[in-house]
Image (tube, rainbow, N blue to C red):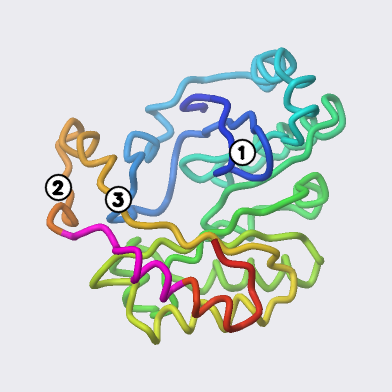
Amino acid sequence: MVHSWDLSTGVDGPGTRFVTFLAGCPLRCRYCHNPDTWHMRDGRRTSADEILREAANCAPFIRTAGGGATISGGEPLLQPVFCGELLHRFKHELGLHTALDTSGFLGARATDALLADTDLVLLDIKSWDRSLYRHLTGRHLAPTLDFARRLADLGKEVWVRFVLVPGLTDQADNVEGVAAFTASLGNVTRVDVLPFHKLGAAKWRALGLDFTLADTPTPTRNQLAAARAAFTAHGLHAL
């Protein structure tokens, strides 16, 4: 079940990317900007052949631009067999660099074969504080940390993503916890500290959902700089 696909630059892995958004996600992040991807039933039944045909049309340009293909969502590992087929075919049929964008909560569903066909994992670590993680997502943090350690053991390149939400994830000890854990892995080549935003608020309203962070401000430049400094202090490349 596929929500959509698109071309993007700079935010879904290196270079220009063909991004496939799979439908369905087990998390209910309070700041999610795509709540319309939560349910598999909201996607469209699509074959890997159809996706590959679309990607093949722009593959020469993508390769020239130093890009590749990214599987995102939703949560791609909710559909691990389909996700694995796409990654395999992007890599071996189209010769594209591959990336998997995941929360890591369903990391146990990623087979070794799927990860072998994945050049880069974009891993969201949303909080270090376990109770806050539960509050933000409705799920537990431990599976994400387990998946991160597995990727480290495999030597798989990872970019960590951390969303800075004022009054929630921006507490110094929370940021420091994520930074220290990330640095301990040894396979993280980049950290994206992403500012909380409200661009998805209209989708929440359209779906009849209560966007509980409507009154939460976006982080200031100084708040973002302080968070990035916490990561760079551990020798990480933070943007």
The secondary structure type at the circle numbered 3 is loop
Where's residue 115, x and y in %?
76, 52
The picture places residue 205, in percent across and down from the top left corner, at 15, 36
Q: Which residue is mark 1?
A: 71
Q: Residue at x 20, y 35 (%)?
A: 202
Specify the amino acid type for callout 1.
Ile
Bounds of the magenta segment = 216-227
Quadrant of the drawing holding the C terminus: bottom right
In this orientation, which residue lies closer to the viewer: 58 or 210?
A: 58
Q: Mark 3 belongs to which amino acid?
A: His
Q: Disc 2 versus disc 1: distance between alpha carbons?
A: 28 Å
User: Helix, strand, or loop for circle 2?
Assistant: loop
Residue 210: image tag: 2
Q: CA distance from mark 3 to mark 1?
A: 22 Å
* Marking on residue 197: 3
Residue 153 placement: quadrant: bottom right
